[in-house]
Amino acid sequence: MSNKVFNILIAGIGGQGGLTLSRILAEAAVKTGFSVKTGETLGMAQRYGSVVSFVRIGGNTYSPIFGSGEADVLLGLELTESVRNMRYLRHRGLIIVADEYRPPSMASITGRAPSRSVLLAELARYNAVVVPARKIAVEAGNPRALNMVLLGVLNAATNILPHHVVEDTIRSIIRGEAGEKSVRAYYEGHKWFKNHR
Amino acid sequence: MSSLNPLKALPGTKLALMGNEAIARGAVEAGVYVVTGYPGTPSSEVIMTIQRYGGDLGIYVEWAVNERVAFEIALGAAISGARALATMKAPGLNVASDPVISAAYSGVDGGLVILVADDPGPHTTQTEQDDRWFAKLAKLPTISPSSPQEAKDYARVAFEISEELMLPVMLLTTTRVNHAVGEVILGEFKEPRRYKGFKRDPPRYVRAGMKWNLERHKWVDQQLSRVEEVTGKHGLNRVEGSGDLCIVTGGAAYNYVVEAVESLGLSGMTRILKLGLIHPLPARFILENIEGCRKILVVEELDPFIEEELAKMLYRAGLHIEILGKHAGWLPFEGELNPVIVREFIARATGVRETGGAEPVKPGVEIPERPPPLCPGCPHRFTFIALRSALLRNGFKPSDIPVFGDIGCYALSVNPPLNSIWTEHSMGASISMAMGLKIAGFEKPVVAVIGDSTFFHAGIPSLIEAVHKRVDMLVLILDNDIVAMTGHQSTPAWSRTETGRETRGISILELVKAIGVDNVAVVDPYNLKEAERIIGEYLVRKGVNVVIAKHPCALEERRTKHVEPYVVDAEKCTGCRACIASTGCPAIIMVEGKAYIIEEDCNGCGLCVRYCQYNAIVRRER
Ligand code: SF4
Ligand code: SF4
């Protein structure tokens, strides 16, 4: 990686592990010797609201957040939230998104929630990498490790961080068995990208 | 959440820390001995970090019942020479304002630091309160960091300044510092500073309208006049770059300024005055360093505090330099700044063209909002549904009976489909505002809804008032045994705190009885029929009637109890949406015209089952 800053926007729903993911990225980046900044925008509740995390690795950054059109990667944990936050993506930026459909429940009552296929079509216009993250996470033994699958795909696509550093960081932040499964999910995500591109 | 223990890692280590974790580390480095506060986003992680990682540091770190009590505990410790920290969000400072405002008059011997977290945006706060004004009001030296590294360093320095000036010091932050993560280089530790001695000294400690308050006021003002000089050695203010385009900034806004100046190619001609000392503003530093400025841009979050002070300073010094900031309409008064707003401002103010890249991606699909709902299985959902049926059962329409809400997760019931609370004002206001409406002449029943922690915090005096003045109302205390909204902190009902301290749990039921309410009952809202019956009865009885709706927070219960999720039988589901429309449970979504329950989110509460006429929602087969 050059001395340029690399901006990642993580978009998801509270409770999906976006904040843990941004923290793992931040710690792994610092261990690798990069400068790092992250910022988060939470809704009011702890869970089930829209949550975005800004992660900025490398370069000489000050601000923990960035503006529209400045993300090198949009990392989406959910389809609706990914499309909602597409404005952050820079021209020709990369979209990596879990094929996870959770429309806002109230909008689905009124029928205002875009369907999965509409969202996928929209994402396809920007060549999004759509990851069967849940399937991979379940195979790795932890359906909640969707975030780690995406981390694997991100690192396979961008090579920003060395494997062993990411692995150590995951283990130290997610302790015990869940940590082992998370490491497995990370490698499975990595492998998936290598095999499917 | 940091992997290395941020409170034990060796000096010189570089860690990725969140601003609040950095403040925790800075306070521990400074030798803090008493740490207390009340949870409030974005301030809570300071205490949570010390509680979580500080186990054997041998310091006192506990939540207090409210911010006022927290501050008074910290003050009591500091007048004896101990170093003490009280943490709170902006409205918490309002709660603590009585003791905070007179604290400067007493002065302290041990360093006393109040961390106050403001919330431009506002992301999680009722107002966009700017507590730099409070610094002036309370006559407190106030410093404000821009990054996690500075958050740590300033936390440390705050104790030094406080001791040197013998005044409490406010460490004032905003969300983008509290919740930002950045690399932080750790410093050396000091031994915790405990009790040294406390002597009787009425002029210092007795404020009962005595003549000596005037003398103390003079002393405070004299101390304040020394702040710039005393803080000089800590390098809180600095000048970056040179040129006749000057930008005065501080706090989170500084970060946007530095990046904007660089990206606009203005580095060679711009002088940035970065202020860390916010009250009193460093007049000498500012006047010395604005010499030769053609114009001055002021970039700051929230109100034009620096801008107005600067204008006064220039006027007094007889200087005529144009100031561009919020007042002339260059920057918004409301909302949070961000890199784009600041870059555009500087570009416009300097006439530099932005070399923006291509247009950002515009999605071709409209995405509906995702208002935060109550969690799957939340007991409050049951209580609000019971309340609604109780109203109907008594012949009222929900639009007839005002429901006064309070601060906590249950305020989310304002959203559809519950559409429950009518007001949410400030901690404890539900009961007293309901009382006001009755006194004003409202004749139908009124309902006040308040959570357990909020009741302990500020609801007790209101309930006393209602009972004492004989104002009829129904009070629902939603007792989920935890401060849920801010991240699951302990309440005074716990008999053991987060740090393992053995305590005496306070019983809400006994407390309410002792106040002398007319009727009180405890119900489990999961028992919907019973809850509905009792709420319905108490609603129309004379007197102050309290129903304690007691069931653990669903997220907490889930950690300890086995959960049997429900599933939708797609064969039977007709897609009528009654399950979602009645509960608003976020574990249920519509996929291709059928309801679908996200298994890992479902808490197995069974509420949705009641609304499906087609018996499509069933226990998962094992
Ligand atoms: S209420 Fe029953 S039939 Fe109607 S959408 Fe829900 S699960 Fe399907
Ligand atoms: S049982 Fe129904 S209402 Fe209860 S948590 Fe599960 S999906 Fe939500």
Image (cartoon, coloured by chain):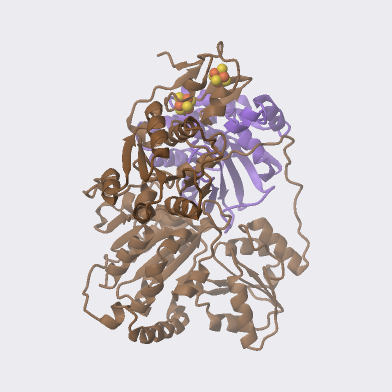
Chain colours: A purple, B brown
How many discs appear?
0
Residue B462, image quadrant: bottom left
- Direction from residue B93 to residue B274 in the image, left or right: right
Q: Residue furthest top?
A: B571
Residue A188 x %, y %: 50, 27
- Direction from residue B588 to residue B78 in the image, left or right: left
Residue occupying the point 62% across, 64% down: B258
Residue B571 x %, y %: 56, 10
Quarter of the rendering occupied by the C terminus of chain B: top left
Residue occupying the point 47% across, 60% down: B90
Q: Residue furthest bottom?
A: B318
Residue A94, image quadrant: top right
Residue nearest the observer in this picture, B225 or B274: B225
- Direction from residue B593 to residue B164 in the image, left or right: left
Residue A152 x %, y %: 53, 34
Q: Is residue A161 above or below residue B123?
A: above
Q: Is residue B616 above or below residue B186?
A: above
Residue A138 x %, y %: 47, 23
Residue B247, image quadrant: bottom right
Residue occupying the point 47% across, 40% down: A166
Specify whether residue B555 is in view.
yes
Quarter of the render that holds ligand 1 = top right
Residue nearest the observer in this picture, B270 or B251: B251
Q: Is residue B500 above or below residue A151?
A: below
Q: Is residue B82 above or below residue B368?
A: below
Specify whether residue B264 is in view.
no
